[in-house]
Amino acid sequence: MKIGKFGKYLTFEVYMKPPKNQHGEEDISVKCLTFQDLHRNVSSRVTEHARILKKHKTEFGGPNLSEITFTMTLSAALGVDPRKMLIQLESCVRQGKIGYFIIGSKKIGKHKYIITNVSESWGHIIKNGKLVSASVDVTMKEYL
């Protein structure tokens, strides 16, 4: 089941299907690439002007760019290659990939977003340095 996506670069999905193996028996196939703790920050610029013996005067300066943050848990046990996904996220940051952030069938905000920061935390590493779990915090900023 598709949950959402970021442009054509990331697809958030959860599914479990029983494909047939080479002997015609069913093998359970699982994939879970989703996020948690999504936060969206929408703010504006407000300036205060000091006045002698009076309260400050405020002035609306316009909207700021909105920002989205969320955490992804990457696990080989859930059908995701953590190292491959970390490389893909890093590539999005370094190449300045932009796209709409969509949850379900609805765009979040009116404009596209760009991934500005990826902070990774490696979990379990097994034989030959294979990364089997990781957590990554992603920050996106509105792109005009």
Image (cartoon, helix red, strand yellow):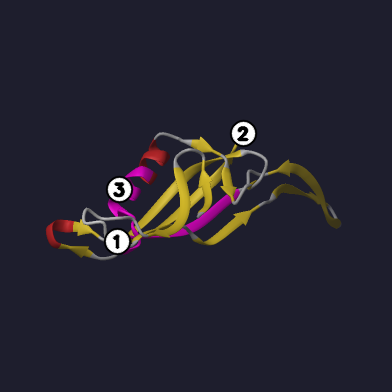
Mark drawn on residue 144: 2
Identify the residue position indicated by label 3 in the image: 84
Q: Residue furthest right?
A: 54
Residue range in magenta is 67-88
Q: Is residue 63 magenta?
A: no
Under tag 2, what secondary structure?
A: loop
Q: Nearer the viewer, mark 1 or mark 2?
A: 1
Residue type indicated by callout 2: Leu
Amino acid type at mark 3: Lys
Rendered view: 142 above or below 68: above
Where does label 1 land, which residue? 27
- Give the camera-side residue of 141 and 15: 15
Looking at the rendered image, the disc whose residue lies closer to the viewer, 1 or 3, is 1
- Give amino acid for label 1: Asp
First in residue order: circle 1 vs circle 3: 1
| Residue 76 picture location, percent across and down | 30, 60
Separation (CA) of disc 3 from disc 2: 29 Å
Q: Is residue 86 magenta?
A: yes
Is 121 placed above or below 111 here?
Answer: below
Residue 138 point in image, percent of width and height: 46, 52
Cα gap from disc 1 to disc 2, whole angstroms: 46 Å
- Give the residue displayed 56% in from the left and 52% down from the top: 68
x%, y% of residue 70?
50, 57
Q: Are marks 1 and 3 in contact (CB under 8 Å)?
A: no
